[in-house]
Structures are given as C-alpha cells and as structure tokens.
Image (cartoon, helix red, strand yellow):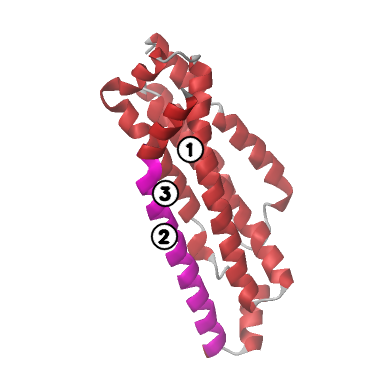
Amino acid sequence: MYKSLLYKEWLKIRYFLLGYCIIFLFIAGYLFLDIRHMLTMGKPIEIWLYIIQYKMLFYRIVKFIPLLGGILMGLTQFGPEMTKNRFRLSFHLPLPEIKMLLFTIGVGSGVFLIINLFFYGGILLVVAKYFASEIVISTAKTILPWFLSGMAGYFSTAAITVEHSWKYRIILILVAGGLISLMLSERGYEEHVFVIWQYIIIIVMLAVTIIFPGYRLRKGSK
C-alpha cells in the first residue's frame, strides 16, 4: 500500500521537481557568472568593502526561491487532490488516516529537502570558488533561514490547501505568513544564527499541522 502511495505522489510531483532543478541550475549559473563579472570589473578592495563593510548580500537572488518552491510543491502535491474533494477517497484506504497524511507529507517534504540540500550545497560551492572560507561559512549561516522558509512554506501550503474552511485557511495564512516573514527578515549577515533551532522546531510543528484539516475533512466538519 505504501508503495502505491509513493508512486502516486511521484506522478504528481515529478514535473515540478524537474522544473525546480532547472531553476536551481539557472540560479547557480547566474550567481557564478555574476560573481566572476563583479571580481573582473571591480577592484578587490572595493569589493571587500561592499561585502564586509556595507554587508552586500551578493547572493540575494537565492532568497525567495526556496519559499516559492515550497509553495508550488505544496500546491502541486495537494491541489489536484482537493479538486472535487478527491482527497476524501484517500481516507477509504486500508490505512489509518493519520499515518496516510503523515506518509504523504513525508514523501513530499523528504524529496523537497533532498533537492534543497543539493541547492544549498551548490550555492556554497559557487561562493567557495571565489571567496575565502570565512565568507563561505557566513553565507551558509545567512542563507539557511531562507531554505528553512521553503520547508515552512511547503508544510503551510499543504495544510492550507487541505483545509476546506476559509475561516481556518485565513488563520493558517496569517500564522504561517508571520512565521515565514521572520525567517526572511535580515539586513546583514548571520542575523538568525541564534534562533535556527527555534525555526526548526516551528517547522516540525507546521509539519504535523496537516493532521487537523485532514481530520476535519474526514469528519465533514465546517
């Protein structure tokens, strides 16, 4: 049964995953060329001043990509299921509804996490090509909340999509929007380094949020 569910989820998200990988390659290539152009056209001292003194986030192009990817991933995986309430059919499978929901969201989040790990590592490799290890480490700490916002965006979108009551949808949107905005708010380097674990705990809590709209859908609550 789990193999059948896994195959069904793969059929829904395979084209999105391909598109997301293409976007990742494009972003990594653009960042590589942009840094090379910046170092070719500018003086090293000026570039160092902009990066260190003025806190120029030269990799800012990456910032919203994980979040947009997470939102699209959630819509791609759960949007078709909510058409004409087809998601209700999943509750008739010989599996406990909570296990089915957690397995479904586990498949999506697991695949999305793996791709984002490659994305994250690829960006750091590009930065390491041109800059010292101190800047690479600083980059890793600075962009980590951006990728965490992608996971938060995925779990939030999944719960919002499954929720069929607009009253609860609005509540979920406001809560998720506030939490994600915190992860994306920065004016320099490593500003969230001391709250990373809090963000991870929040994401784990968002991961199980889908149980509540799923249960309400199963019982036909409004």
Magenta span: chief secondary structure: helix
Residue 26 seen: yes
* Residue bounds of the magenta highlight: 12-40
Front-lying residue, 52 or 30: 30
Q: Which residue is mark 2?
A: 23
Vertically, is 154 above or below 119? above
Compute the Cα span from label 2 to label 3.
10 Å
Compute the Cα span from label 2 to label 1.
18 Å
Residue depicted at x 45% and y 21%: 213
The location of residue 36, given as percent across then percent down, is 53, 82
Q: Say what amino acid the circle numbered 1 marks.
A: Gly
Mark 2: secondary structure: helix
Q: Say what amino acid the circle numbered 3 marks.
A: Leu
Front-lying residue, 33 or 47: 33
Q: Is residue 57 magenta?
A: no
The image's mark for residue 182 is none
Q: Which residue is mark 1?
A: 108
User: Does residue 175 appear to the left or right of 222 in the view shown?
Assistant: right
Earlier in the chain: of badge 1 and badge 3, it is 3
The crowding category of the residue bearing disc 2, from other C-alpha atoms within 10 Å (few below 14, some 14 to 19, many at least 20), is: some
Q: Say what amino acid the circle numbered 2 marks.
A: Ile
Picture quadrant where residue 26 is located: bottom left
The crowding category of the residue bearing disc 3, from other C-alpha atoms within 10 Å (few below 14, some 14 to 19, many at least 20), is: some
Q: Is residue 26 magenta?
A: yes
Front-lying residue, 59 or 36: 36
Earlier in the chain: of badge 2 and badge 3, it is 3
The image's mark for residue 17 is 3
Mark 3: secondary structure: helix
User: Does residue 166 appear to the left or right of 42 in the view shown?
Assistant: left
